[in-house]
Image (cartoon, rainbow, N blue to C red):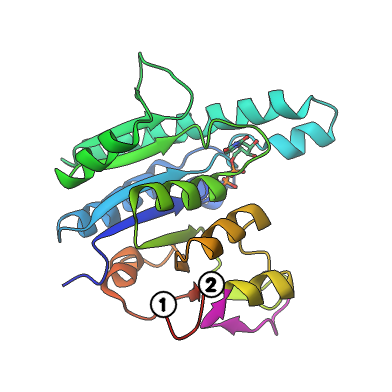
Amino acid sequence: MAKYKRVILKLSGEALAGEQGFGIDNGVLKSIAEQIKEVRDIGVEVAIVVGGGNIWRGATASHKGMERATADYMGMLATTINSLALQDALESIGVVTRVQTAIEMRQIAEPYIRRRAINHLSKGRVVIFAAGTGNPYFSTDTTAALRAAEIGAETILLAKGKVDGVYDSDPLTNPDAKKFDELTYIEVLKRGLGVMDSTATSLCMDNNIPLIVFALSEKGNIKKAVMGEKIGTIIRGDKND
Ligand code: UDP
């Protein structure tokens, strides 16, 4: 039996890029879709928030002189491109999906309607939330926190491309970096750990939504996370929760 009945899976854009570091890697996409199917098949309701960093990042473009809001809207469109790619990969292996966008694009997806999303989930459909929150200056991590609170998800699974949890320094550059098994949100904020941006972290903390940070590169990790197996780093409001 799965530990969680309804989860939000947050996939960073980079997780879709694979080794090439940008764009969408079809092999990676297929592998992620299979892992999602595996947990859907054991009855877990899965809603997904996809990032867009593999295509476009608003803040980076704005540092180079573009107006921030415009750059961010482009980022939200990038998340929609990724969402459609993931929808295609899931449908091709028999998983029924719906994409809901926070900015209306009726020809390609449903608009975000909370009650409708919950209805889809209860019917075993995988719902993909695209276009972030619909607002510039936010991130898809914040989108994951917001949607988790709205639909009553029990946890957010924060799937990274390579890094398999939260470390006290960057494990890709520091071989002595130490991984945390458990943390509280207050510790994350106090230590300034780069797990999510502070808006997303605060939203999770205020609504007491646990977060499991793990790597997608190891197959079967999404299932392990929903089964309650100890993987990556778990972040909670209180360690005793
Ligand atoms: N974005 C936004 N509002 C949102 C969500 C996303 O403006 O509610 C924009 C922002 O420019 C961001 C880009 O979309 O840089 C891609 O999202 P994010 O950086 O969160 O993707 P990830 O890092 O997860 O790939």
Q: CA distance from mark 1 to mark 2?
A: 8 Å
Which quadrant, please, contains the C terminus? Answer: bottom left
Spot occupied by residue 175 in the image (x, y as percentages of width and height): 69, 80
Q: Is 79 within the magenta?
A: no
Left or right of residue 177: residue 115: left
Q: Is 180 within the magenta?
A: yes
Task: List the single residue furthest toward the top.
Answer: 107
Dot 2 amino acid type: Gly
Ligand 1 within 8 Å of disc 1? The answer is no
Spot occupied by residue 52 in the image (x, y as percentages of width and height): 55, 39
Q: Secondary structure at mark 2?
A: loop
Dot 1 amino acid type: Ile
Q: Which residues are magenta?
A: 174-184
Q: Which mark is residue 231?
A: 1
Left or right of residue 176: residue 36: left
Q: Is residue 220 above or below residue 38?
A: below
Give whichever of 230, 121 is nearer the camera: 121
What residue would you read off at disc 2? 165
Spot occupied by residue 223 in the image (x, y as percentages of width and height): 28, 66
Please tell me how crowded label 2 is: few (under 14), some (14-19), or many (20+) other residues with Cα within 10 Å.
many
Left or right of residue 116: residue 163: right
Residue 86 visible in the current orientation: yes
Q: State the residue at coordinates (37%, 15%).
A: 106
Which quadrant, please, contains the N terminus? Answer: bottom left
Upstream in sequence: badge 1 or badge 2: 2
Question: Mark 2 and mark 1 in contact (Cβ < 8 Å)?
Answer: yes
